[in-house]
Structure formats: C-alpha cells, structure tokens
Image (cartoon, grey):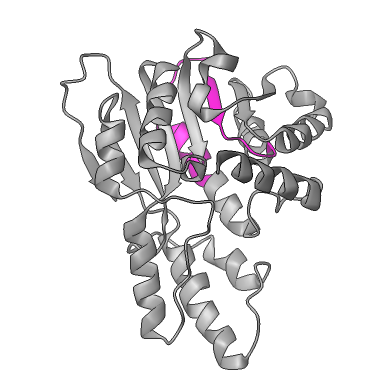
Amino acid sequence: MREKIREYWDERARSYSGSVGATTDDVYLRELEIFTIVTTLRELDLPKPARVLDVGCGDGYSTLKVADTFRDMQFLGIDFSEGMIKIARQRLEARPDLMNHVAFIVGDVTDVGQVCGDSVYDVALTDRCLINLNSSEVQSEAIARIAEHTRPGGFYIAIENFVEGHEKMNETRGLVGLPPIPVRWHNLYFKEDEFVRAAGCFFEDIVFKNFSSSYYFATRVIYSAMCQMRGEVPDYHHEIHQLAVRLPWFGEFSPIRMAVMRRRKSSPMSRAVAVSR
C-alpha cells in the first residue's frame, strides 16, 4: 500500500510537470495554506535564524513561497516521492536567491533520522502529509519521529485532514441536495482525539485552527450547489475560490485543519491541551 501511494505521487509529479497543481488540484486552497503557515510562523517565538523542517514538502512550491517571506530562516524540505523532489529542486534552481537557505532531499516521514541524522529544528511542518500513511499506528510513529527532530520548546505545525470536519461538510452538503465527498483511497483522516493523544505524548499547548472552514463552505457547499443547479462541472479556478480565500474563518465545514503545538521541555507526563478556534 505504501509503495502504491508513492507511485501515485510520482505519477502526479510526471503528469503535472511542475505546475502548481501537482499536490492538489485546488490551487487556491494551497495559497490559503501558505498564507496561514506564514501568519502562524510570525506569531511564534522563534530564534534567529530559525531552522524549519518541512516533512512531506511535495514539489516544494509551498516551501519556497514561505522561505521567500522568511529570508532569515533555514528550510529543509523532505518527501518520499523522488518525482516531487526533482520538481522541488528545479523550482529552487529557478530561484538562486533562495539557494543559500533552502534544500530538498528525498526522505520518509516514518524515518526522518535517515536524512536529518541528529539534527533538531525550531519548527517542524507537515501539510497533508500524515494522511498518506495507511494506519493510525504508523501515523503515531511518524509524529514520534517528527518530535525527535523538533527541539525542546520548538514547534510543530500540522495541516492535516480530520474526520469531524469532513463529516460536517458532507452533512451540510446534504442539506442542499449534494452527494457526500468520499475520502480518497490513499488518505486516512485523523479523529481529533486520536491526533491529540498521539501528539500529546511529545507536544503540549495544542491549538487547532479551522482556517479553511469558510473556504470549504463557499466552494464545496454554495458553489457546488450552484453548479448542480446549472448542470455545470465545478472548476477549481472559478473566481469564487479566489474570493473565498479572503473570508474570515467560521464553523467547522472543512476536513483540513491546522494544529499548532510546542515540543515539551519536561517529561511526557506534562498536560497537553487541545483548543479549537
């Protein structure tokens, strides 16, 4: 199964050939994710220069956009798809101004130490990465590996998909006569309590941000219902996606959430707190 998922992402790397849609067809969602990562990094108490580990960086598009904003940070992006890393390196070659503080290496979230050695980072980041692991046990083990490479007092920013938001989205779609959107074959969504339990072994002060909820309500409910009424196929490049990025957050209508947490300085017996906003 793991190899099949790798092949899927390698094939997307070949098919999209460096276009912005290699890791998701919803290109405006990707821009919203980047904006939220940048905003969150600005909120954190980080040393200068901070070191950022982007685990599951895909084609490097998001990594480079974030790195372009934070020229005083060092970024290492790793991904298990050789095709995606090839594209990421091509993107980096086109940005010589970033080459001194960004690097991309083939690496696996389940074995971060293979490429990072004993290095620890001020920030670890995953963006729809852990949902590509095919069991909750492997997901928990991946979080443990990420924790090993996050310095005590450092931060982990996880943008991942959650069951609760997915179910709420589909429930709302049903109210306007839309069919449910299934979870894709290569994805395993988290339940919030399971994520908190796995992350809470190593991280504390866990805060959830429903940053894409309004975006999903506008695009997966309102716009999709309009398309159904008109007999049209939804278009990820439609203007409503571009406008929806600007909406303030409300509700819990998206499976995609951000969790921000701090690496424990003390023993694992310290209390983890999960807060939604």
Q: Does the magenta stretch include residue 11?
A: no
Question: 47 or 152, which is in the foreground?
Answer: 152
The residue at 28%/19% (across/down) is: 264
Q: Where is residue 162 in the image (x, y as percent from the top left)?
A: 37, 53
Determine the residue located farthest toward the front in the rendered image: 1
* Image quarter of residue 165: bottom left
Residue 49 visible in the displayed image: no
Q: In this view, does 197 lie to the left or right of 239?
A: left
Q: Is residue 207 left or right of residue 1?
A: left
Q: Is residue 210 left or right of residue 96?
A: left
* Image quarter of residue 105: top right
The residue at 38%/81% (across/down) is: 174
Q: Is residue 204 left or right of residue 47?
A: left
Question: 30 or 55, which is in the foreground?
Answer: 55
Q: Give the range drawn in magenta.
A: 35-60
Residue 8 visible in the displayed image: yes
> How many numbered discs, if any?
0
The quarter of the picture where the N terminus appears is: top right
* Image quarter of residue 18: top right
Q: Does the magenta stretch include residue 40?
A: yes
Q: Where is residue 65 in the image (x, y as percent from the top left)?
A: 65, 38
